[in-house]
Image (tube, helix red, strand yellow):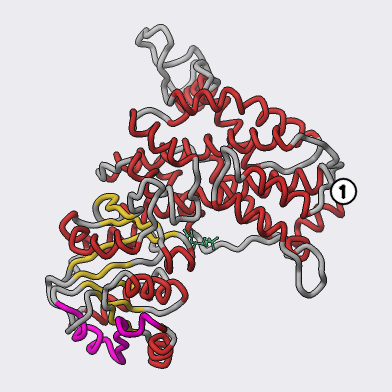
């Protein structure tokens, strides 16, 4: 046996990850369900082919790896993972380690970690798409510290490095913790993308800017506080021309968003945790509405499209997006804190922000500041950290203006508006739930607490008492 590690599943992400591992000096044994794919992978590995050991069966794969073995699984999340684990069971020793690097549902990872597999198991979230996997992804691990430590030299070698040189690979906690953090990453990814799309809509439909002009705005923003991968690629996609028609590429793409489910899982899990993440929920809802092409067309035919003309300065839009982004991340980190408590994971919030600084899809300059703010006091909501409270104070009037005027002009701004609503609720010490409590007590004698502390939990409605 000569391989330091094995990998199962040479799809786009698996192949890129395997080349990254080989490039960092680790001989890797690979296996794919279709043998031809495995051999083609070796043939196309170029300079790295020496470190790639193709195998034709799982038995050969296992035999090619030094013991105790480590094997990365990069197969579609769900049943395929369970099938592979089952197929590996008779072949592996109890000291071997299998790492699920797909976008697994963290509940599945919990089940697999605790379900008595006869070998060690890590769940690992990998972000950054194909390019990230090939040249440096962000890696979020879940499992025991000892198992993580065994493969950490390889994982930190292949991971992206933040500005300060720190690798974006870390163990988040036990069992499903890594896949949980990756799931919230994806929820935030949905929200970041949706808020950018909303601002794009204001420029396209409100200000009647063409794609080239919009591209320039995104490109400018990428030099400022919004500097991030998603803003950068937004500048690039709006700049591109369709080779078939010569039109701007974005103008010929159907307005129907795909989704594989991780954003939806985040929203569902947030409800279980009673963690408010309205910006992410709005982003998931917006993808669902986008899929209803026919209904939207019928809606427009019946009700007419609202007049949308409305101008904002790019600076106002930039400030609104800054505010929306801070609110969204504040919600996401608070959800992670809630999960940490519920699942007993002791998740390291600043550590998570640090892992997200490079390699992943939501990487951005702001995550540096978030890591610092969370390090000062991880138990405080991000919006209360002085640095972000100051930024918000400056940016909130723009968000309020963009949402209120944008909505008045007929623009759909679900994510930005949800951020604003959450903010207004969060800074209202005397809210309106006293009314809810009165109603609950009226129809069901559910009881309430009084402001004055008097111990009389029911109102004088004379029902159910
Ligand atoms: C990443 C991404 C990735 C995700 C795609 C597609 O971090 O690299 O989150 O894991 O699968 O972005 O997600 P949707 O198909 O749900 O948009």
Which residue occupies the foreground of this view, 269 or 463?
A: 269
Identify the image quadrant of the N terminus: bottom left
In x, y percent, where is residue 61? 25, 85
Q: Estimate the x, y position of residue 341 in percent, counting from the top left.
A: 29, 39
Q: Is residue 254 visible?
A: no
Front-most of residues 54 and 99: 54
Specify the segment rendered in magenta. 47-66
Q: x, y (%) of residue 69?
A: 18, 74
Q: In the rendered image, is residue 405 in sight?
A: yes
In the image, farthest residue toward the front: 47
Query: Residue 278's quadrant in the figure?
Result: top right
Q: Is residue 276 magenta?
A: no
Badge 1 crowding class, 10 Å Cα cut-off, few under 14, some 14 to 19, many 20 or more, is few
Residue 62 image point, x, y percent:
21, 83
Residue at image x 33%, y 62%?
108
The residue carrying mark 1 is 304
């Amino acid at each position: 046996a000569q391989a330091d590690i094995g990998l199962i599943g040479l799809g786009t992400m698996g192949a890129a990850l395997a080349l990254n591992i080989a490039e960092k000096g680790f001989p890797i044994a690979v296996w794919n369900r279709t043998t031809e794919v495995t051999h083609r992978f070796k043939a196309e590995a170029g300079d790295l082919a020496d470190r790639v050991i193709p195998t034709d069966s799982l038995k050969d794969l296992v035999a090619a790896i030094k013991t105790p073995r480590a094997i990365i699984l990069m197969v579609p999340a769900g049943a395929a993972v369970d099938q592979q684990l089952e197929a590996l069971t008779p072949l592996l020793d109890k000291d071997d380690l299998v790492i699920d690097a797909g976008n697994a549902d963290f509940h599945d990872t919990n089940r697999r970690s605790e379900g008595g597999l006869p070998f060690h198991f890590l769940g690992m979230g990998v972000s950054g798409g194909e390019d990230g996997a090939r040249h440096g992804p962000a890696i979020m691990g879940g499992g025991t510290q000892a198992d993580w430590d065994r493969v950490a030299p390889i994982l930190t070698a292949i991971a992206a490095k933040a500005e300060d040189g720190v690798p974006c690979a870390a163990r988040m906690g036990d069992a499903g913790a890594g896949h949980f953090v990756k799931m919230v990453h994806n929820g935030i990814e949905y929200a970041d993308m949706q808020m950018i799309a909303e601002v794009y809509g204001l420029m396209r439909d409100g200000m009647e800017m063409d794609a080239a002009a919009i591209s320039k705005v995104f490109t400018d923003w990428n030099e400022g506080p919004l500097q991030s991968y998603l803003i950068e690629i937004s500048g690039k996609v709006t700049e591109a021309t369709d080779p078939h028609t010569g039109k701007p590429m974005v103008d010929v793409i159907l307005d129907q968003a795909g989704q594989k489910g991780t954003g939806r899982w985040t929203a569902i899990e947030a409800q279980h945790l009673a963690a408010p993440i309205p910006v992410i929920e709005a982003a998931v809802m917006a993808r669902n509405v986008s899929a209803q092409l026919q209904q939207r067309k019928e809606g427009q035919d019946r009700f007419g499209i609202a007049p949308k003309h409305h101008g904002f300065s790019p600076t106002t839009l930039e400030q609104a997006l800054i505010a929306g982004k801070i609110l969204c991340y504040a919600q996401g980190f608070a959800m992670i804190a809630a999960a940490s408590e519920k699942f007993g994971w002791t998740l390291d919030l600043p550590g998570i922000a640090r892992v997200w600084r490079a390699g992943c899809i939501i990487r951005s300059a702001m995550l540096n500041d978030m890591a610092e703010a969370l390090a000062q006091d991880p138990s405080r909501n991000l919006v209360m950290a002085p640095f972000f409270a100051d930024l918000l104070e400056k940016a909130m009037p723009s968000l309020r203006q963009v949402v209120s005027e944008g909505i008045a002009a007929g623009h759909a701004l679900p994510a930005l508006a949800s951020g604003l609503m959450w903010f207004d609720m969060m800074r209202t010490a005397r809210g309106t739930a006293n009314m809810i409590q009165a109603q609950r007590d009226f129809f069901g004698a559910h009881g309430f607490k009084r402001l004055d502390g008097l111990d009389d939990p029911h109102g004088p409605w004379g029902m159910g008492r």
